[in-house]
Image: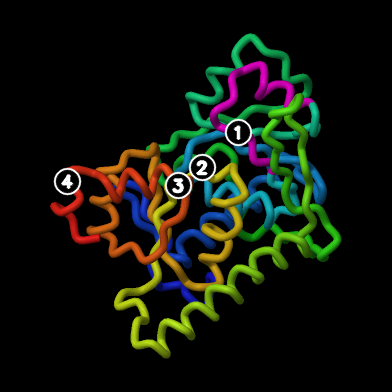
Amino acid sequence: FCNQNKDAEFLVDGDLRMTFGDAYAAARTLAGGLIANKGIEVGDRVGIGARNSANWVVAYMGILMAGGVATLLNGWWQGSEFAEAIALVDCKLVLADPKRAARLEGHDIGRTELFIYDNAKPPLEAFADLIGGAAAEMPLPVLTGDDKATILFTSGSTGRSKGAWSTHRAVVQATMNYVGATLVLLQLATARGEAPKYPPSTLMNVPLFHVTAEVPMLLQGFALGRKLVLMRKWDAEEAMRLIERERITYFTGVPLMSIELATHPKRDDYDL
């Protein structure tokens, strides 16, 4: 999908803008670095503990391409919760931003290696110390649908949060279910003369560590060639500004987000 849409804009993160081709190339290089320099093998758990950013997306892609299991750590956890989850699933490596890494100070994460990256830098700079050498030429493993792909965590509302794994087949099936539904809606809208006027674009206003952001928003975007506009933190007026500037065609989230947009006193100041 990245090759089909290689020249189309994919990630918008503040002033950073990347095409699908840019993101794939960065992730391919990171994947080679994870194998060559960190010894990542098929099935190794690699955690991501960070806020939404282009680097989070590239890290997710690179981990999967290297054969690792992308372990999506809840960015809202406190240090003890982070450490417990890392130990529970036996992460070999965790990629974290400075804020999340600081929470882990003083907590035992055993043999897990922690790599801290800068959200403000573009991917190849942020992950430079992981890449090194001829990472882009490092052969990647051949994966099957039965290989584990991701670990996401339950809410922990009735006890400790548990890691729930999915295979590559399950993740692809879930993603393509959404694609099928979206194409049906597009066909119906087109028949009514109501097809979107602008290229597909989504506002990433929920955390990437949650399945809503991961599957229908991020992964479906690859198949649709859809631009992803990242928000660091929810703010209704900032959301309206981005909807207008980036011509957002797809928005989802908790109901309160929609209510805040619908009732915002400055709603009429923006073209939504």
Q: Which residue is mark 1?
A: 74
In the picture as drawn, the residue positioned furthest to the bottom comes out as 191
Place of residue 38 in the rendered image (x, y in percent of width and height, measured from the top left)? 71, 39
Labels 2 and 3 touching (C-beta < 8 A): no
Q: Are marks 2 and 1 in contact (CB under 8 Å)?
A: yes
- Within 10 Å of the Cα at label 3, are there few (<14), some (14-19), or many (20+) other Cα atoms? few
Name which of mark 2 and mark 1 comes first in the sequence.
1
Three-letter amino acid code at the position of disc 4: Lys
- Magenta-drawn segment: 71-87
* Circle 4 or circle 2, nearest the eye: 4
Residue 131's spot in the image, x, y percent?
Answer: 58, 45
Q: Is residue 72 left or right of residue 151?
A: left
What's the residue type where badge 1 is placed?
Asn
Label 2 amino acid? Pro
**Residue, far top:** 106
Kindly indicate the quadrant of the structure image that contains residue 144: bottom right
Cα–Cα gap, marks 3 and 1: 21 Å
In screen coordinates, is 199 left or right of 270? right
Quadrant in which the N terminus is drawn: bottom right
Tell me if residue 248 comes above or below residue 196 in the rendering: above
Please tell me which of labels 3 and 1 falls first in the chain: 1
Question: Residue at 68% of width from left, 54% of height from top?
Answer: 64
User: Where 60 sits versus 28, above or below?
Assistant: above
Q: Which residue carries the number 4 mark?
A: 266
User: Which residue in the rendered view is the most extreme toward the right?
Assistant: 146
Secondary structure of the residue carrying numbered label 4: loop
Q: Earlier in the sequence, mark 4 or mark 3?
A: 3
User: Which residue matches tag 3?
Assistant: 255
Q: CA distance from mark 1 to mark 4?
A: 32 Å
